[in-house]
Amino acid sequence: MGRRQSLQHGAIAVGIVGGILVGAVGALMRQFMVYFVPSFGLYSSVDLTVHALIALCVGFGMKEIAGKFWLLSGLVMGIVAVATMALFPISAHSLPPFSWTMLTVFPASLAGMALKEVSEEEESEGQSG
Amino acid sequence: MSTVIRRWYLTKSVLTLVVWIWIILLLTISLRRFNLFGAQAFDLGIFQQGVWLLANGLNPFITIRGWHLFADHFSPILFVFVPFYKFFPHPFWLFFGQTAALALGVIPLYRLALRHTQNELTATFIAISYLLHPAIMTMLFFDFHPVLLSIPFILWAIDALDENRPSPFFIACFLSLLCREDVAVSVACLGLYGFLVRRRWWSGAMVLVSVFWFVFATKMMAILSGEEKTAYFSLYSKWGETPLQIVFGILSNPIEALKALFFCEGHFTQPGAYPMLLLAPFAFFPLFSGIFVLFALPNYAVLALSDWRAMRELGFQHAAIIAPWLAASLPFAFRKLQKLVDERWQVKWQKVLVSTFALCLTVSFFRYVPHTYLHFHTNILPKEQARQIKAFLSEVIPPDASVSAPSQFVPHLAHRREIYLFPNPFQRAGYGPSAETLKQLDGRLWVKPLKVKAMHRRMEEKRVDYIVLKAGRHNTWPLKPDYYEQTAVAVLTCRSYGVFAVKGDIVVLKRGANFDLGLLKLGVSTWQLISERRREKALEKAVKEAWERLREGSKWEGDSHFNMVP
């Protein structure tokens, strides 16, 4: 029971830190995008796609640390990523709406973890087959 | 040499190098700002005059602020600068002191981090991050403040408490209390943390000492300011009148207090952004430090629950109260986070933690540090112009004369017994111990210009040898630009003073100097042709026009007013 609980805590921690990482990368991308590609404004489809891809990659990379509680980790990561992107002081002077981020980054975080799960299942099936 | 020792040497060398670069860079920035007239009367001028008076064995009554040096803030640590000021009176010592002090905070933080994370790289990273946090680093962009000197002492005390060493803990706490009266909140919280959480009974004694010190210091401030209580309590007037009432007011209105803690705002910082500005650069990790962060809360409350909006802006010294807690929470947070993940994934997990942390710090650094740097350097003058003004002021104004000058000139004239921030002492603005003064300092209340006749009467009564004016609408605080210009015209039409010298857009008036000759220097010559009856109005109009000419046409290099120093 104790072990299970500590694994759950670990998964939550992974989700939180992963979410902060996604948010920070997103904030960094937004800072650079303003300089390099001015037409890709905040919350444009390109901006949201880039963030979703980042969330997907981070989720995929962190799945193994989350272990079997990957779903919990993915949910936490999605929520924290969206919250961090909204709250991170890239634009803390005017907190922008983040409903579109919620619709893209949140499922992407979950999908990142799930992808790893699928790939691991396929790998183990391949080995047994 | 083993790998561990080699890594230990390497990380220490990197940290030392970073600290030295940081000190040199920040010290250069501070000195450059001072040399180019970017430093202000509040607060560099105040501390310059205070330390200069102490070094010369004089009563430290700060004429810039209108009260005793220790009535403003109880900071006996300023005596440390006295021998240096006796040797060479220059704000270099103040800048060097606060920059070196802030940098030295790295040592206890590194020790604490190494003990908790057991990883030299992570410990080095934490120590460097403390130097680069926007709220910590930018404090050095704005003049000098003794409260910054408390940061390394508080970090040292936390390290000593963590290592169970009572003597260094007590020494560090006593030294930090000498920096400013409200550091007592930090020391009390630390003592309480040690007593309740770490079971160090001796740290409990520090709670009593800091409470006693706070009462003593604030009483001394009240006595020295000639008031019943220090005006700074009025910053928390919505919670209560006395410290006890304030604490009770906060505890009995928890919803209101929580709202203020989360959604406090600054001058430019939107509601809710300030806690993010503190936490985001450290990747929100301080929130994972467990119970330690709870003891940091009263320090944050000192900033968040105050009426003073500048307390919640980057670049101001107020963050010094929370800075050591933020930094010291990192080792605890890293240890907690490390423990949460299975041993197998520890290396990867550490990498994730460090890269998340580094990324948040980088983003915040580039987003806020250059921005704050520019904010505090908007009023600096070109190098050549600054050099000429410095030479001009030292040539025209004797070192022992009393002077009233705009804010940016005060630090260059501060080493004298009487230096006033214009329009003081003729009209009170940001002067004296009242609560209204604090409102003026925070931009919540503006002084309106006096009528011309009233101003002239005050100028006859108050004896100031020289008045310095700068034609322009920038850097006119504590007056609004319009009010500053109206006051300047009133001053220039007073016959008790005459224009003594003009250079570029700077006018120096001297008490008792020839008024008519002075007007000629200002470029006013036709007003006397008007009939006697309308003369005063005509004079005012002519002076106003001359002032506007100075303001609009003062190109420094090719200025026609050059070399008009008598």
Image: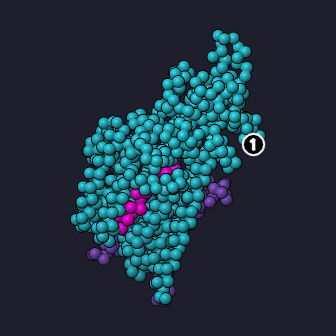
Please report the residue visible at 61 percent of the width from the left and 31 percent of the height from the top: B509
Q: Picture coordinates of residue B298 (x, y %)?
A: 33, 53
Q: On the picture, is A95 further left or further right than B111?
A: right
Q: Chain of mark 1?
A: B
Q: Picture coordinates of residue B553 (x, y %)?
A: 73, 35
| Displayed quadrant of residue B238 | top left
Magenta stretch contains residue B249: no
- Compared with residue B428, is residue B409 higher up or lower down, i.e. above or below? below
Please report the residue visible at 69 percent of the width from the left and 11 percent of the height from the top: B531
Q: On the picture, is A79 further left or further right than A57?
A: left
Which chain is displayed in cyan in the rendered image? B
Query: In the rendered view of the protein, which quadrant contains the C terminus of chain B?
Result: top right
Q: Picture coordinates of residue B180 (x, y %)?
A: 38, 51
Residue type at numbered disc 1: Glu
Camera-side residue of B118 and B433: B433
Please report the residue visible at 27 percent of the width from the left and 59 percent of the height from the top: B206
The magenta-colored residue range is B142-159
According to the picture, the residue beneath numbered tag 1 turns out to be B557
